[in-house]
Image (spheres, rainbow, N blue to C red):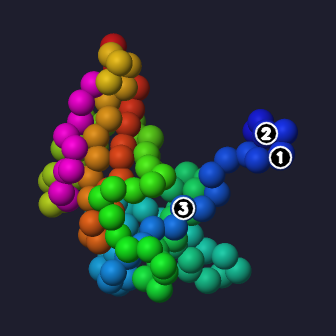
């Protein structure tokens, strides 16, 4: 894994504000199917590849569909991901569209109203 001149390597943790932690945990576990992330044998959030998603209900921030920074999740094929999200009753905020003739990109809202983007390379 390449690192920057400061030794920075990759995104490790992303924290999302939530209003109802139990509802958010159900969404990430049951709707998105993410595995729990643990530290020292204690559940701390959800695992997404090498990144841990923390759900914070006691945080300074509030859930928002106007995130800064923007979180984009890589997926196998964004149009299929959108269809599966819709089947699970997930709100699609931005339907998948083709950008620069290279990437399919869309977004959805989690159970708390946070907007998460997802993308995949265009399949030939």
Residue 96: in magenta span: yes
| x and y, in percent, of residue 91 in the image | 18, 57
Task: Tell me the element at label 3.
Answer: strand
Q: CA distance from mark 2 to mark 3?
A: 19 Å
Eyeballing the image, is 47 above or below 43?
Answer: above
Count the marks. Answer: 3
Magenta highlight range: 90-98
Classify residue 43 by image quadrant. Answer: bottom right
Q: Quadrant of the N terminus?
A: top right
Task: Name the residue that disc number 1 marks.
Answer: 7
Circle 3 residue = 14
Which badge, 2 or 3, comes first in the chain's sequence?
A: 2
Question: Between marks 1 and 2, how big is the CA–CA gap?
Answer: 5 Å
Q: Do the numbered discs 1 and 2 sit on residues whose CB atoms are within 8 Å?
A: yes
- Circles 3, 1 touching at the beta carbon (< 8 Å): no
Q: Position of residue 10 (x, y in %)?
A: 67, 47
Label 2: few (<14), some (14–19) or many (≥20) C-alpha neighbours in 10 Å? few
- Provide residue 83's location: percent of width, then percent of height: 19, 44
- Residue at 35 percent across and 70 percent down: it is 63
Q: Quadrant of the C terminus?
A: top left
Instruction: Give the image location of residue 108, x and y in percent.
Output: 26, 53
Q: Is residue 35 magenta?
A: no
Instruction: Classify residue 38 by image quadrant.
Output: bottom right
Judging depth in this view, the residue of 87 and 120 nearest the camera is 120
Marked residue nearer the N-terminal end (3 or 1): 1
Residue placed under numbered mark 2 in the picture: 4
What's the distance in space between the residues labelled 3 and 1, CA to CA? 19 Å
């Amino acid at each position: 894994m390449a690192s920057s001149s400061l030794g920075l390597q990759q995104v490790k943790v992303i924290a999302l504000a939530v209003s109802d932690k139990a509802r958010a945990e159900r969404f990430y576990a049951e709707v998105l199917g993410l595995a729990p992330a643990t530290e020292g044998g204690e559940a701390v959030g959800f695992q997404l590849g090498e990144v841990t998603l923390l759900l914070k209900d006691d945080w300074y921030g509030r859930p928002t569909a106007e995130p800064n920074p923007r979180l984009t999740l890589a997926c196998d094929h964004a149009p299929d991901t959108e269809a599966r999200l819709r089947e699970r009753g997930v709100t699609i905020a931005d339907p998948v569209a083709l950008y620069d003739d290279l990437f399919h990109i869309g977004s959805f809202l989690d159970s708390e109203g946070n907007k998460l983007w997802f993308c995949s390379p265009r399949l030939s």
